Every structure is written in C-alpha cells, then in structure tokens.
C-alpha cells in the first residue's frame, strides 16, 4: 500500500510528521528525537497556551458532551476523562489549530466521540483546511498489568471507522497499561505485540504505536520485531507522570533503533538530559539494512 505524503496546496494530514517538521525548518534532520509535544491542550486556555508555546504537535483528548449521562449529546468536546464537559468543542479546536503550523494528535478514550469527530475532520479536509499531519490515537488492546474488567476501545470498530470516514491520517493504536512501582511492573509480551500486528497488518496508513516507556526496555525484543514488520511503523514513547524512566533506558532504545522510528514524548528533566547525551555520545550506529 502507498502512503500519500503531500496534497495539492498543502501537506496531507496522512503525511510523515518528520517530513513536515523538516520542511518547516522545525527540526535539523529527519530524526524523531527532535519532535516536541504539548499535552492535554483541551480547554480554550490550554489550547491557546499550547499554540503560543514551542511544541510542534498538540495532543488533545476528545469525548462527547455529557458522556454516559442523560445530558449526553453527539457533540465532540475537548476533555480528558473523567471530565465530560468543556468550554471547547472539537469543531472550534480544529478551526483554531489548523490556522497554526502545529501537528495534531487526537486521543479517543471512547467510541462514542469517534464517528462525529471523523465527520468534522472530513468536512475540514474537504475545504483544504488541514495542512498538517493528523494522528488519531486510541487504546484498542489490553496491555501490561491491566485487570480484565477494564475495557479498551473496540479495536475493529475504531480501525474500521477510520478507514471508512477519514483514512488520510496516521493511526496511533495502543494498549491500555498500568504501572505501579514494585507492584505492577510486568512488561509487554510477544503475544500482545503480535495481536496488534495482526490488527494493523493490512492498513494502508502510517502507524505509530504508543508505548509506555517505563516498560519498553524489558519488552524491547518484541517491539524490535514489530518495527521490522513494516517501514510505515514507528513507536511513540510516553510516560505516566510518576513513571521512573531513566536516561539509560532511553539511550538503550536509541542505540538499538532507527532514529526515524522512535518519538520521545517524555517529561523533563529526563528528556533534556537524554537528548544532550544522545547528541554528544551516540553517533547513530543504527543502519537500516
């Protein structure tokens, strides 16, 4: 399958984020270590702050207004569970953010908001409003340390709706995870990774798998296998606020991977320490061969 990198009159929402950042002069080389993120750009204030800030990609959470109450509507709003109300709708968020040069990452915590959100994206794209990369994220499988009663977003519905309504995106399918130091520390398994590979194998899009960074090194063999399955695949390392990630763990991943295939969505100060050491000491030894 082919992936569309450009679009007439602008950049395709399904294009490569690294190419986009490189074209704009935001990064010095095609290396995902340079891409920066703003989290939870949901409310009007948070969105405006993120737009003024240096982050290259705005990450925001989409749900429907009044989810699971008698006031529930079909209107996608920008809020992170358990919040079910917001002063910002997806429509307004998209109208505002597409006027900037920031990349877009939308996180869907439930299926209810997906279909109306895809309709809004399709309408905006048909008016040539979206000229930046768009990533659509949902946790569609149960991952490490998660009890059986916790349900991920329905995988087949999520993937099918994206294909049907707005396929010109990067898909970001992840695993529900739990991490509690000393208590819940099991890594990802080969089975979890193979299950994901089977789900996305036939998709035409670029795919970035969000991976909980604190569990990645112990699972590296499985993810190394996953990345080898397609040149369209990448990982986005993310960190729970209290996750004890070390610079050494990040350097290990960096040393054993293609620099175009690993995005680092990690908190300070570890991120800066890691980047400084990576720049100084690690001539990129990895070669695609």
Image (tube, grey):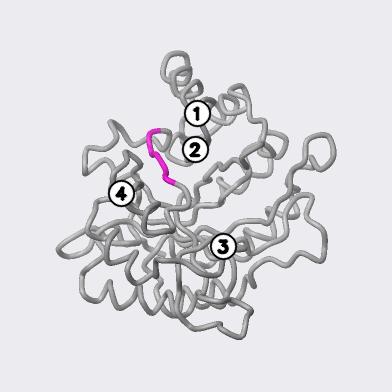
- Write down the residue under mark 4: 51
Q: In this rendering, is residue 110 above or below 61?
A: below
Q: Position of residue 134 (x, y in %)?
A: 37, 59
Q: CA distance from mark 3 to mark 4?
A: 23 Å
Rate crowding at label 2 as few (under 14), some (14 to 19) or many (20 or more) other CA atoms within 10 Å.
many
37 within the magenta span:
yes
- Write down the residue under mark 3: 138
Which image quarter: residue 131? Answer: bottom left
- Among the two numbered marks 2 and 4 on one chain, the one whose residue lies closer to the N terminus: 4
In the image: residue 181, left or right of residue 139? right
- Among the two numbered marks 4 and 1 on one chain, the one whose residue lies closer to the N terminus: 4
CB-based contact (under 8 Å), mark 1 and mark 2: yes
Q: CA distance from mark 2 to mark 4?
A: 20 Å
Rate crowding at label 1 as few (under 14), some (14 to 19) or many (20 or more) other CA atoms within 10 Å.
some
Which image quarter: residue 218? Answer: top right
CB-based contact (under 8 Å), mark 3 and mark 1: no
Q: Position of residue 45 (x, y in %)?
A: 37, 53
CB-based contact (under 8 Å), mark 3 and mark 4: no
Magenta residues span: 34-38
- Write down the residue under mark 1: 271
In the image: residue 17, left or right of residue 232? left
The residue nearer to you, when weighing 37 against 232, is 37
Which residue is depicted at the point 24% across and 58% down?
11
Residue furthest left in the image: 9
Q: Nearer the viewer, mark 3 or mark 4?
A: 4
**Count of numbered circles in the view:** 4
- Among the two numbered marks 3 and 4 on one chain, the one whose residue lies closer to the N terminus: 4
- Write down the residue under mark 2: 264
Q: Nearer the viewer, mark 2 or mark 4?
A: 4
Q: CA distance from mark 2 to mark 3?
A: 18 Å
- Among the two numbered marks 3 and 1 on one chain, the one whose residue lies closer to the N terminus: 3
């Amino acid at each position: 399958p082919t992936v569309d990198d450009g679009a007439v009159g602008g950049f395709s929402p399904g294009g490569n984020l690294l190419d986009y950042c490189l074209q704009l002069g935001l990064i010095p080389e095609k290396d995902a270590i340079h891409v920066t993120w703003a989290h939870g750009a949901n409310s009007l204030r948070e969105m405006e702050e993120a737009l003024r800030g240096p982050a290259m990609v705005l990450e925001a959470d989409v749900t429907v207004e009044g989810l699971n109450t008698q006031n529930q509507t079909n209107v996608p709003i920008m809020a992170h569970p358990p919040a079910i109300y917001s002063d910002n709708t997806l429509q307004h968020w998209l109208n505002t953010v597409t006027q900037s040069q920031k990349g877009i990452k939308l996180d869907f915590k439930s299926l209810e908001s997906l279909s109306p959100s895809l309709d809004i994206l399709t309408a905006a794209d048909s008016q040539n409003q979206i000229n930046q990369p768009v990533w659509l994220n949902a946790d569609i499988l149960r991952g490490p340390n998660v009890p059986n009663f916790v349900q991920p977003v329905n995988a087949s519905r999520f993937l099918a709706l994206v294909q049907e309504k707005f396929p010109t995106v990067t898909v970001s399918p992840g695993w529900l995870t739990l991490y509690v130091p000393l208590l819940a520390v099991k890594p990802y398994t080969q089975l979890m990774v193979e299950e994901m590979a089977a789900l996305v194998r036939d998709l035409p899009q670029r795919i970035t798998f969000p991976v909980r960074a604190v569990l990645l090194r112990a699972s590296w063999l499985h993810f190394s296998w996953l990345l080898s399955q397609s040149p369209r695949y990448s990982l986005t390392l993310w960190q729970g606020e209290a996750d004890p990630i070390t610079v050494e763990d990040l350097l290990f991943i960096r040393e054993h991977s293609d620099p175009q295939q690993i995005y680092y969505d990690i908190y300070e100060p570890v991120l800066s320490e890691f980047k400084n050491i990576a720049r100084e000491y690690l001539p990129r030894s990895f070669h695609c061969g």
